[in-house]
Image (spheres, rainbow, N blue to C red):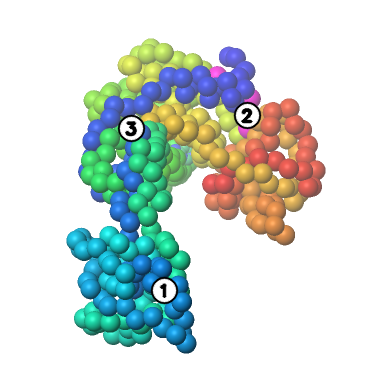
Amino acid sequence: MSLLSVQEAQERIIHHFKPTETETLSLNQCAGRVLAADILSSDLPLFDNSSVDGFAVQARDLVDASAASPRTLSVVADIPAGSAPNITLAPGQAARIMTGAPIPKGADAVIMVEDTDFDHGASGLAAPEKVKAFKKIKSGENIRTRGMDVKRGRKVLFAGHKLRPQDLGLLAMLGVANVAVFRKPRVALLSSGDELTPVELPLEPGKIRDTNSYTIAALIAEAGCEVLPLGIAPDSREVIQFLFDQAIGMNADAIISTAGVSVGAFDFVKDIIESNGKLDFWRVNMRPGKPLAFGEYRGVRFIGLPGNPVSAFVGFEVFVRPALGRLAGLKTVARSKVKVRLAEAIESDGRESYLRAIVEERDGVLSAKLTGHQGSGNLLSLVQANALLIVPAGVKSLAIGDQIDAWLI
Ligand code: AMP
Ligand code: MG
């Protein structure tokens, strides 16, 4: 069994994952989906419009206007939002205008209603015949000009970007009703082990709760994939194979399993993969983490995570999340890291280590403290953590105040 660095193992895995095919969805189905094509903008805003409620004017009419010496203009039009004015303002004229309404021809500024004698307290008032302006105004004031935010033709969203709520708003603004996105990957999940009992059933002596099905299913969903739950398999060659075949029948894009990949007498998962596909079995230079199984079952990519709940979680974050990200069409699959400062000294054994920690801001710096003992079955220490500290390979000790990378989880 070869010894691989984390990075080598990540690269070998991700290399085997390609984005799913694309589909076109209506915009309201696209939250959290990954764009499959670049989006070019039109001019935004689409037309010159008013940024305030007030009166569209010619700025040079108001050069001498002040509270002491207001300037009176005749109001020749009323322009609510959504209307298309077909007038041209002449000198001495104004048009009442609402926020977002198109600027009429001839006007080059909008004076706010608050800077006029028009009573803006009441709604539903008809436009006045005349209005007094109490202030001078610069040409262009209170006008949002066509293309001021974005010029036509600019690439505003990119293929491989996961759509957030504000992105959906921008697509709507651009009139993109149907969006090309990558199909949601279908990811089958199996927990294996004779000792495992689902949470609904009574616990018999010697058995434990299946934990990973819940944690890993939620991680898969969070990674933008559909979960195909295969449930729990006992340590039985026939049952495990039967369930993997179900995954094939459901057109899974990937199969993830936990446990059963150690070298124990009952660890059948890797034998099954080996005799029905291809198996790479690696010892990765990391902690926590046992051997990692990677390969394919009847043509479908397979990743076998360790059984211990914390190891399974960390293995998911390190190896599965990037792979599923690639499958889902994401352009950037690496989690972003932050720099934190250690509030306690840390010993490591030279393997790349992912340590559970609480990161808090203290005096403007992110400060990190471990959440108790780092045993790979101690799930509470993961629950209490809001970060995984990444101790690089080769580092055996770190002192208080040292800087280190972390993932916020
Ligand atoms: P294994 O990889 O089968 O040797 O399992 C390693 C450890 O993880 C054992 O203590 C298992 O009982 C435990 N384990 C395996 N699968 C799960 C699971 N789905 N939920 C909770 N613990 C598990
Ligand atoms: Mg086992």
Magenta highlight on residue 111: no
Residue holding disc 3 = 37
Q: Quadrant of the N terminus?
A: top right
User: Could you tell me residue 32's position as x and y percent?
Assistant: 36, 44
Residue closer to the observer: 395 or 72: 72
* In-image side of 1 versus 58 (left or right): right
| Residue drawn where x is 41% and y is 51% of the image | 148
The rendered magenta stretch, by its main secondary structure, is classed as: strand
Among all residues in the image, which is located at the extreme bottom?
68
Quarter of image, res 336? top right
**Which comes sooner in the sequence, label 3 or label 2?**
3
* In the image, residue 274 above or below residue 321: above
* In the image, residue 118 above or below residue 40: below
- The residue segment tinted magenta is 282-287
Please name which of the two marks, 2 or 1, marks the residue nearer to the observer: 1
User: What amino acid is found at the position of numbered circle 2 in the picture?
Assistant: Met
* In-image side of 246 versus 263 (left or right): left
Among all residues in the image, which is located at the extreme front?
91
Does the residue at mark 3 contact the one at mark 2 (Cβ under 8 Å)? no
**Which comes sooner in the sequence, label 1 or label 3?**
3
User: Could you tell me residue 251's position as x and y percent?
Assistant: 26, 26
Residue holding disc 2 = 286
Residue holding disc 1 = 62
* Secondary structure found at label 1: helix
Quarter of image, res 283? top right
